[in-house]
Image (tube, rainbow, N blue to C red):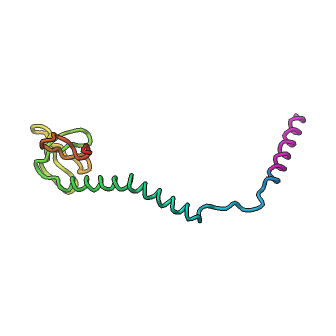
């Protein structure tokens, strides 16, 4: 046990001497004030904005527009995968007829898309690319 304590003391004292000698004489320079760094950060923010944030905002705006334009008779797809026809539209809910004598009430946020009966077939707006 005595030998172990001596060994530990030797190791700690040796590392203390090494770290004391390795201290820098000057403060390291920061690159935050460098114009090149600021320019690169601005470019990175622009790339993130145009590749991630802007398309997400555009999709959210299209979804909100679709929900605001829901009307009676529209065929809709819910986030649960239920397909039905809109019977009544309220402020925050939609009554969807899914079968004869079966009407379900959904929050507007639960509607994932309006199905189109055009030449392209039935597709939700999120699936078009």
Q: Magenta region: which residues?
A: 1-18
| Residue at image location 78% in from the left, 56% down from the top | 23
* Residue lying furthest front: 36
Residue 98 lies in quadrant:
top left
- Judge left or right: residue 4 versus residue 104: right
> Looking at the picture, how far across and down is residue 85, in whole percent?
13, 44
- On screen, 99 above or below 43? above
Residue 27 lies in quadrant:
bottom right
Q: Quadrant of the C terminus?
A: top left
> Looking at the picture, how far across and down is residue 117, in whole percent?
12, 43
> Looking at the picture, how far across and down is residue 105, in whole percent?
19, 46
| Residue at image location 43% in from the left, 54% down from the top | 48
> Looking at the picture, how far across and down is residue 103, in whole percent?
14, 42
Specify whether residue 5 is painted magenta. Answer: yes
- Judge left or right: residue 108 versus residue 36: left
| Residue at image location 89% in from the left, 35% down from the top | 3
- On screen, 41 above or below 99? below
How many numbered marks appear?
A: 0
- Dominant secondary structure (helix, strand or loop) of the stretch shown in magenta: helix
Specify whether residue 13 is painted magenta. Answer: yes
Seen from the viewer's position, the closer of residues 90 and 119 is 119
Seen from the viewer's position, the closer of residues 48 and 117 is 48
Q: Quadrant of the N terminus?
A: top right
Seen from the viewer's position, the closer of residues 97 and 16 is 16
Residue 64 lies in quadrant:
bottom left
- On screen, 43 above or below 9? below
- Judge left or right: residue 106 versus residue 17: left
């Amino acid at each position: 046990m005595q030998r172990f304590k001596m060994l530990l003391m030797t190791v700690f004292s040796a590392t203390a001497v090494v770290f004391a000698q390795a201290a820098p004489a000057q403060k390291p320079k920061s690159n935050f004030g460098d114009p090149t760094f600021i320019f690169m950060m601005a470019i990175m923010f622009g790339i993130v904005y145009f590749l991630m944030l802007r398309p997400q905002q555009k999709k959210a705006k299209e979804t909100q527009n679709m929900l605001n334009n829901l009307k009676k008779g529209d065929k809709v797809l819910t986030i649960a995968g239920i397909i039905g026809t809109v019977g009544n539209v309220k402020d925050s809910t939609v009554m969807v007829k899914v079968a004869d004598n079966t009407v379900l009430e959904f929050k507007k946020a639960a509607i994932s898309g309006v199905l189109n009966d055009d030449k392209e077939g039935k597709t939700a707006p999120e699936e078009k690319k």
